[in-house]
Each structure stands twice: as structure tokens, then as C-alpha cells.
Image (cartoon, rainbow, N blue to C red):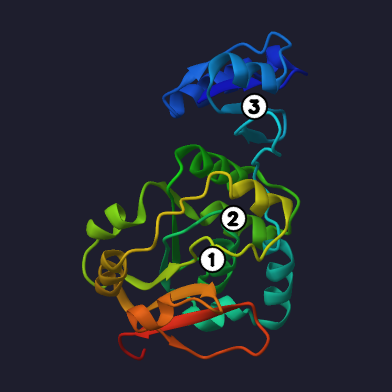
Amino acid sequence: MIVTTARKQAKQLQDRAQQIAIDLDCSFVKRNDLSVSELINGWKQEVLVTGANRLSLYHDGEEAPFFYHPNAAAFRAKAFLKDGYDVFVQATGLKPGSQILDCTLGLAADAVIAKLAVGEAGRVTGIEAHPAIAYIVHQGLQEWQDAGEKVRSAMRSVEVISGHHLNYLKLQADNSYDVVYFDPMFEAALDQSTGIQALKQYANYETLSSEAIEEATRVAKYRVVLKDHWQSTRFDEWGFHVEKRRLAKFQYGIIEKKQR
């Protein structure tokens, strides 16, 4: 991967782009008024463009880039703050002070809702396998302004870790998180929003493993939660209990360790 600047304000953005290249241990390349397609064709690598208001990751010159946007989290947050209900919060059983490990962070929509649910005393940690995606999402959470104060505070408080969830789980002590959560990318595309579609170019499609579920069960104090397509065989394969939601395209499966 290479890092460059947007065409506009290239000089003003160069210092930040160079720092991002250092952070991600990759090369900085001056834009020189080249198109993204020309940069990709010339360097044969993905291109991260540093703009004035966002970071954009291009896989090739034809596809839409990946950039941070809260997507449905903004609507969910507004509803949750109004009536205190969210299906994800209900499935995970989060309460003020809870600690949750989100093993498949993505755009961090669930993580933001989780932080609203657990409050200042709680902890939300999210793991993202793709280093550049983790970086972009972390920066987006820290810098996004188009949200209320409570939502912005929740976004700033999500801990983002770049790495593979199994490796991280293996390093954690028994019962070190109240909840461990998985939302693997569906083979069937359920969400047609631009952010999710762009993310799918970089998604880790490695099959969720039995070892990961075993480690999650060890690390979770109360429950392991899996969100998956309603036709998924993984619920039965690993012993998740599903309280089916009528007409829902996805369901939540739960491995309950003990009641709180």
C-alpha cells in the first residue's frame, strides 16, 4: 500500500500523509496530479488518499473507495438514546459497566452502540484484521463531528486494535470480558449501503473457526454472541441458542456461560 494526498491542498496535506505512511509502515508518494488509477497502475498497490476531511482507501481505480462513515449507527444511536432499546444490546445483554470484545469491528457501528450502553464505566474493544481499515476506522471515530455530544463521546471511547481476533483472544485471561461478540461478513449481502459494500473489498472472509469460538467462550465471563444470516449452519455447529426474530434476515445466537 502507498499513501498520498488528495489533489487539492496537496502541499497542506503532505505532512499528515507522511505521518500516516510512518504509522502504517508503508511508502508515501507525492500525488503529482496523477489520478488514483494511474497511481494504482504504476505502483501495483492499494492507495490510501489523505484528504482534508477523510481518509480513503482504493483497492483499484474502478471500485468505490473505503472511508469511515457511521452508517446506520447514527440512526440506531438516536433511537437507543430515546427509548433505551437496540436488538444488539438486548442480544449481548450489555449494561452500564459491562466490558465487550467485538472480534469483527468493521465500521464499528455495533461498537458505538455498545459504548452508549455500557457508559463511561464500561469498556468496548474492537478488533479489525486489515491494518489500513483499522487505522481509517480509528481516525474516523476520533474525528467524526456530525453527531451529538453523547455519540461523539462514545465514538472517541471505542478502543480499536489492528490484528486477528484469534491471536488477540489467545492473549486474554479467562473471563476477562463480560461478552465476546462476532459478526462475520455474510456470504449473502444483506446491507447495500456504500460503506458496507466498499468494506467488502477488504473483508476477512476466512471462515470463523471452532478454535476462535472455544477461545471466546474461555475469555467471556457471561456470554458469547454470534450474529449471522438466518440460514447459517454455524449456530447449530457450535451450540448457539437462537431466539428467532420473525422475518429478520439475520439472527443472534448466544452461548450463555452464567447468569449475571
In front: mark 3 or mark 2? 3
* Structural crowding at the residue carrying mark 3, measured as other residues with C-alpha within 10 Å and reported as few (<14), some (14–19) or many (≥20): many
Whole-number angstrom distance, CA of label 2 to CA of label 1 = 8 Å
Q: Is residue 53 visible?
A: yes
Residue 54, which numbered label?
none
Q: Would you name the residue on which mark 1 appears?
A: 115
Residue under the image location 71 percent in, 33 percent down: 62
Q: Are marks 3 and 2 in contact (CB under 8 Å)?
A: no
Q: Is residue 222 above or below residue 51?
A: below
Residue under the image location 59 percent in, 50 percent down: 200
Q: Earlier in the sequence, mark 3 or mark 2?
A: 3
Q: Is residue 95 visible?
A: no
* Label 3 residue SS: strand
> Which of the 4 quarters of the picture holds residue 212?
bottom left
Give the amino acid type for the residue marked by disc 1 in the picture.
Lys
Q: Position of residue 38 (x, y in %)?
A: 67, 16
Query: Quadrant of the image for the C terminus?
Result: bottom left
> Which of the 4 quarters of the picture holds residue 67?
top right
Q: Would you name the residue on which mark 2 appears?
A: 155
Asked whether 259 or 95 is in front, the reply is: 259
Q: Are marks 2 and 1 in contact (CB under 8 Å)?
A: yes
Give the amino acid type for the residue marked by disc 2 in the picture.
Met
